[in-house]
């Protein structure tokens, strides 16, 4: 039995983490593509493809709302506001959320999402009185403003095909609906609008001389229609040309006797029979229009433009410049680094310090070869190594950018482009070994040497592989390095599989090299998607058909050296990372699986249905061990989940206890956080007289939790208690006091 001598010491230090923050989600997404805006009580409400945000006109303060705040989706497509200042938003998937701006509470309408129709996008929300007209991909639905219920749906608008896409709607004395086929108008005195004969139909391009229609609005007693061929006016049961023929009009808005219109790049004003161009911006795409007392607001692909007093300014939250989170890595300071994509899909790389996003792209940093950054690795040497798709290796260290390609290193150009562009140097992955040597995986190299090292002595060596398989110019995938400095990398086409290489510390002597490969006879599949090395040095291999573990990396072909993770059999694995407690976070096309250190137990599973995860198709995962944050990349945004898996301290420097005092109610749901632990700490809780009332092991990291109960599961009485933490040998001990108030 272990014994520990308790030293009564009071340590008054503020806690760095608390139980209430564990399990908290945050979502970071690209919000520059704005869909629509509305104005209410001095605030703008803006729907974007990355979520909803409010903007205060007075102080420019921005509040963001994502799935972490109660939205069902962040891929917003429509926005409106009712007479009670409730903001209504619709999404790509068919969700409708209602935000009460007074209470900040969010309600949901999920009936459309749960319907059986394949396409359910909410294209427009028009509110008139106590009715919300929802224009959907399969028809027009009416909802109650007061109780949010659906009370009618119109799926066959006259002679248009059943379940036609409705783009927008408008209600005056009659209901008007813009569809993919033209305009449907309620017949006067029609009562049963579910009957097709209750609608008149005007087809494009026969009845309306345009390829498509976008919106209907009332102006000076007339009904106007915006189309791909200007504005039309409804008169004598027909649509005739009015203004701006030849221009594709995206939206209209009315303020008094003035009509405002936008094309893809121009803002027009129509008043007193005169048409004036107010503003033009060809660098972005205009989407929708809103007019308020603070000016004219144009939703664009680059943010919300406020045009007021002949001046324009761009409004948008600080955030990532894309929702493409292809690869992630966290540096020694807890900063997140993001690679955004290959070829034209890449927009540079990002750094996130927990508050602000910084973009590194060629426009801002001309020394970068291009914006096609496909992979990123924040190394223990404080450098950030970036794989550019065509531009070689970029190293960022101490704010200095260095670029290496086939002109100043032994890296190779692309085998397929030798007759065209010999400067194209695609890099798949980069890692650093235990001695600080940088290993680089070169994709389809013309030199037939896919693996290159840049040594601590600033020398370059490249390696070819003729045995067991010839893999000279094959496409490469992921790269990891185990504690024995063996390089493990994947070939994703040609001689597919997992390869390993160890130069034994002699870069220019190849006779002692260890080389081998592992294929389908041992792995779930030879199509390898990701690799990771855990705390024991085991290699975790993600494939399109599941997850494998190489339990003996020094002899990987030995019997039973490779096992399968049964929880993920036949599951396409996309990415994997290891947290400070050696738990495995596995990204798949069905969400995130969190596995125990041995992979046997499924600890948690996160999907877009049971959590704020933006999307089930996970593209990347990394972990911040300093703050216990799992970063999860999807194509709809980046999720950050705060966990208790925090890197333990090397030695005790005091315990941080929070909350202190601990207030216990009859339910006993409060937890106290014990922060400042070393690896695998043991914890004892004593009364002030020295009686042990609780004895337990920490999860293994920097924090543990106490629920205010004794060994019998009973809530403790009010008083002062001593919390003691010590290592396995009871050689390192630290203590703190906590006050408990029992209510």
Image (cartoon, rainbow, N blue to C red):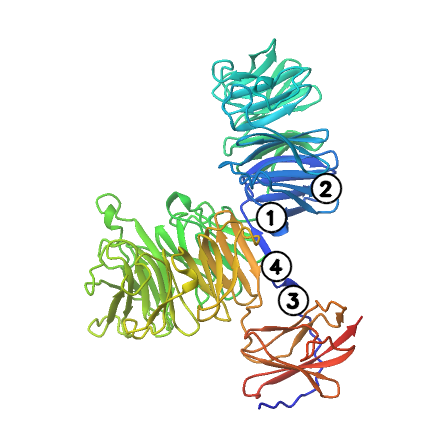
Query: Residue 165, image x and y in percent?
Result: 52, 28
Calculate the distance from the C-alpha at mark 4 to the C-alpha at mark 1: 13 Å
Whether residue 317 is visible, yes or no, is yes
The relative height of residue 643 versus residue 220 in the rendered view (above or below) is: below
- The residue labelled by disc 1 is 66
Q: Could you say whether the residue bearing mark 3 is in a helix, strand or loop?
A: helix
Q: Position of residue 135 (x, y in %)?
A: 58, 30
- What is the x, y in percent for residue 475? 28, 54
Q: Is residue 411 depicted above or below 290 in this figure?
A: below
Farthest residue to the top: give it: 236
Upstream in sequence: badge 4 or badge 1: 4
Q: Nearer the viewer, residue 252 or 25?
A: 25
Quarter of the image with the C terminus in it: bottom right
Q: Which residue is mark 3?
A: 19
Spatial CA distance of label 2 from label 3 is: 36 Å
Q: Nearer the viewer, residue 222 or 524?
A: 524
Q: Which residue is mark 2?
A: 58
Mark 2 residue crowding within 10 angstroms, few (<14) / some (14–19) / many (20+): few
Task: Point out which mark residue 504 bears.
Answer: none
Residue identifier under label 4: 24
- Point out the frontmost of discs 1 and 2: 1
Mark 3 or 1, nearer chain start: 3
Query: Residue 107 vs residue 334: left or right?
Result: right
Task: Point out the tag, 2 or 3, that comes first from the N-terminus.
Answer: 3
- For the residues labelled 1 and 2, the Cα–Cα distance comes to 23 Å
């Amino acid at each position: 039995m272990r014994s520990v001598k308790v030293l009564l010491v009071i340590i008054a230090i503020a806690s760095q983490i608390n139980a209430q923050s564990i399990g908290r989600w945050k979502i970071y997404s690209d919000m520059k593509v704005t869909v629509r805006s509305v104005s209410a009580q001095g605030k703008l409400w803006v729907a974007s493809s990355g979520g909803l945000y409010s903007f205060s006109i007075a102080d420019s303060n921005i509040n963001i709302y994502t799935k972490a705040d109660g939205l069902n989706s962040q891929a917003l497509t429509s926005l409106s506001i009712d007479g009670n200042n409730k903001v209504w938003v619709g999404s790509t998937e068919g969700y409708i959320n209602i935000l009460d701006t007074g209470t900040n509470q969010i309600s949901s309408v999920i009936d459309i999402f749960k319907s059986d129709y394949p396409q359910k996008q909410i294209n427009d929300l028009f509110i008139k009185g106590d009715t919300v007209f929802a224009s959907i991909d399969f028809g027009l639905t009416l909802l109650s403003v007061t109780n949010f219920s659906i009370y009618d749906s119109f799926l066959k608008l006259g002679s248009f095909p059943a379940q036609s896409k409705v783009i927008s709607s408008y209600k005056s004395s009659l209901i008007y609906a813009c569809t993919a086929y033209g305009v449907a108008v309620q017949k006067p005195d029609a009562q049963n609008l579910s009957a097709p004969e209750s609608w008149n139909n005007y087809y494009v391009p026969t009845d309306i001389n345009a390829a498509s229609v976008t919106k209907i609005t009332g102006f000076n007693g007339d009904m106007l229609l915006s189309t791909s061929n200007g504005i039309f006016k409804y008169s004598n049961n027909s649509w005739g040309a009015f203004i701006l023929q030849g221009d594709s009009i995206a939206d209209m808005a009315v303020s008094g006797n003035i009509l405002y219109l936008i094309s893809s790049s121009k803002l027009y004003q129509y008043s007193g029979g005169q048409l004036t161009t107010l503003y033009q911006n060809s660098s972005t795409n205009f989407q929708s229009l809103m007019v308020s007392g603070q000016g004219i607001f144009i939703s664009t692909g680059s943010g919300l433009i406020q045009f007021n007093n002949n001046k324009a300014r761009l409004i948008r939250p600080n955030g990532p410049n894309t929702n493409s989170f292809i690869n992630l890595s966290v540096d020694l300071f807890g900063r997140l680094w993001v690679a955004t994509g290959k070829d034209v899909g890449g927009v540079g790389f990002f750094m996130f310090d927990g508050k602000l996003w910084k973009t590194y792209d060629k426009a801002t940093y001309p020394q970068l070869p291009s914006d096609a950054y496909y992979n990123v690795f924040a190394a223990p040497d404080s450098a950030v190594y970036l794989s550019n798709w065509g531009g070689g290796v970029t190293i960022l260290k101490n704010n200095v950018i260095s670029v290496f390609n086939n002109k100043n290193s032994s890296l190779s150009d692309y085998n397929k482009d030798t007759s065209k562009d010999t400067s194209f140097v695609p890099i798949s992955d980069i890692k650093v070994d235990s001695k600080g040597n940088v290993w680089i995986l070169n994709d389809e190299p013309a030199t037939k040497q896919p693996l290159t090292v840049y040594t601590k002595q600033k020398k370059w060596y490249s390696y070819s592989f003729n045995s067991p398989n010839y893999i000279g110019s094959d496409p490469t995938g992921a790269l990891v390095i185990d504690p024995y400095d063996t390089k493990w990398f994947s070939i994703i086409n040609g001689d597919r599989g997992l390869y390993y290489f160890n130069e034994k510390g002699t870069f220019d002597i190849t006779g002692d090299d260890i080389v081998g490969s592992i294929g389908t006879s041992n792995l779930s599949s030879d199509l390898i998607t990701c690799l990771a090395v855990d705390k024991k040095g085991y290699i975790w291999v993600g494939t399109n058909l599941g997850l494998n573990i190489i339990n003996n990396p020094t002899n990987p072909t030995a019997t039973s050296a490779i096992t399968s993770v049964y929880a993920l059999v036949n599951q396409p694995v996309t990415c994997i990372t290891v947290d400070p407690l050696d738990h495995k976070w596995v990204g798949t096309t069905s969400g995130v699986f969190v596995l125990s250190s041995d992979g046997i137990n499924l600890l948690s599973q996160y999907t877009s249905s049971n959590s704020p995860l933006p999307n089930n198709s996970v593209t990347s995962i990394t972990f911040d061990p300093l703050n216990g944050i799992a970063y999860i990349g999807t194509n709809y945004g980046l999720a950050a989940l705060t966990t208790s898996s925090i890197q333990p301290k090397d030695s005790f420097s005091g315990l941080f206890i929070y909350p202190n005092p601990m207030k216990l109610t009859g339910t006993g749901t409060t937890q106290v956080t014990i922060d400042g632990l070393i690896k695998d700490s043991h914890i004892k809780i004593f009364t002030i007289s020295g009686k042990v009332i609780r004895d337990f092991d920490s999860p293994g990291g920097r924090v543990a939790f106490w629920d205010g109960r004794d060994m019998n599961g009973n809530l403790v009485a009010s008083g002062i208690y001593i919390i003691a933490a010590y290592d396995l040998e009871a050689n390192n001990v630290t203590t703190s006091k906590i006050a408990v108030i029992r209510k």
